[in-house]
Amino acid sequence: MILLIGPGAVGTVLATHLAAAKRLPLKLYVRERSLAAMQAVSELRVDRPGKTPPLQAARPGLTTQLDLHGVRYLFLCVKYPDLDALLLQLPPVPADCTLVSTLNGIAPLRLIRERLPRARIVPMTVMFNGQLLSPLHARITTKAQVLIGSDDDTLLGAFEGSGLQTQRADGDSAVWGKLLINLANAVCAITHTTFRDLLSNDDLRAIYVRVLDEAVGLLDVAGVPYQLHVPLPYPWYRQFILHGGPLPWWVAKIKNGLRDGAYPSMVADVEQGRRTEVDQLNGEVLRLAQAQNMAAPVNAGIVEQVHRMERGAQPPSFLTPKELRLRLGG
Ligand SMILES: NC(=O)c1ccc[n+]([C@@H]2O[C@H](COP(=O)([O-])OP(=O)(O)OC[C@H]3O[C@@H](n4cnc5c(N)ncnc54)[C@H](OP(=O)(O)O)[C@@H]3O)[C@@H](O)[C@H]2O)c1
């Protein structure tokens, strides 16, 4: 059985596909306060982009008891700030139960491994963008796809026939690959720019490539594998971003279903004075550097600037792409 914890945006998308695939029995663990609203719904639903009809499936059973008896896969679909409390709440994890973490980044995996050193943990990199519209009703704006860091065929096949594409990844490599892509978020947040700007403006492209060069260099030194989400080796990818003219944006638009005005959520976080995820993104590059006794001045500059904006006056004063490029040393 699969027990899925936290049917919010991502949890609802995964649960709907799992329920539609009908490969493994599924149960949803919800908090007491959300139970009544979810019981009132008879179907799971995911609205999909373009003309693709919504995916609907009968609502699986709900539980407010964290009972892991008979649970083969435990899907963790909560946000990072809720993770520690959830892990403390978990009963002992049976030896034949695999924890599947859908949380972005390396920090959640580190925390789960610290708290549950004997458990089998599989990272699932979520490649779609999901929003929750109402209880157990979500929307995706991009292709339904996940990368699973395991060769467990039962898990890889659990979504078969549902329309959600699964791809095998090597351990944490896809998590690092996604983290590399997400290093762009802070660049956009500091300059209040969109994905389109990032991949079209020469200053932003140069900054992003410097951020990536530093991160990839450190991963190579540390011997940490990463899987880029484009079928190109990194040296080619960086050339493509720098010198690909309008192509990088067009590829992102077609491959990831990004729209012209789309921006990373960190832009809104900074704009609205909320705490950002910069420590779990560019901050991970600093952590890598520290472990190697090396410096990461570009990512350190990015983290420092985002922190300054988080603490600073509202509305924040954004930098122009040129200003940021100069501040990071050309
Ligand atoms: N959204 C995306 O497009 C996307 C893409 C890639 C990766 N991710 C990753 O997916 C994870 C989930 O993101 P999301 O956007 O789905 O967040 P979300 O919509 O806020 O969903 C999180 C769900 O977890 C529930 N929850 C939190 N603590 C719980 C607990 N102790 N027991 C039971 N349920 C609990 C929340 O319930 P309440 O509503 O009651 O608080 C909420 O329903 C994040 O870590 C994120 O990094 C998201």
Image (cartoon, rainbow, N blue to C red):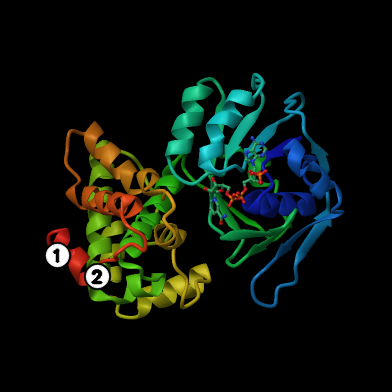
**Rendered residue at 50%/71% (across/down):** 258
**Rendered residue at 22%/67% (across/down):** 206
* Neighbourhood count class around disc 1 (C-alpha, 10 Å): few under 14, some 14–19, many 20 upward: few
Left or right of residue 192, residue 110 in this image? right
Residue 166 horizontal/vertical position (percent): 60, 53
- Asked if residue 29 shows in the view, the reply is no
What residue is pinned by disc 2? 321
Disc 2 residue type (three-letter): Pro
* Kind of element beneath mark 2: helix
- Quarter holding residue 48: bottom right
Given the current orientation, which residue lies at the most extreme left position? 329
Mark 2 sits near ligand 1, with its Cβ under 8 Å away: no
* Kind of element beneath mark 1: helix
- Quarter holding residue 236: bottom left
- Asked if residue 92 shows in the view, the reply is yes
Of residues 269 and 204, the one drawn nearer to the viewer in this rendering: 269
**Rendered residue at 42%/44% (across/down):** 173
Q: Which quadrant holds the N terminus? A: top right
**Rendered residue at 78%/39% (across/down):** 27
* Neighbourhood count class around disc 2 (C-alpha, 10 Å): few under 14, some 14–19, many 20 upward: many
> Which label's residue is closer to the chain start, 2 or 1?
2
In the image, residue 170 above or below residue 49: above
Of residues 58 and 156, the one drawn nearer to the viewer in this rendering: 58
Q: Which mark is residue 326?
A: 1
Given the current orientation, which residue lies at the most extreme bottom position? 246
Left or right of residue 184, residue 204 in this image? left
Q: Which mark is residue 134?
A: none
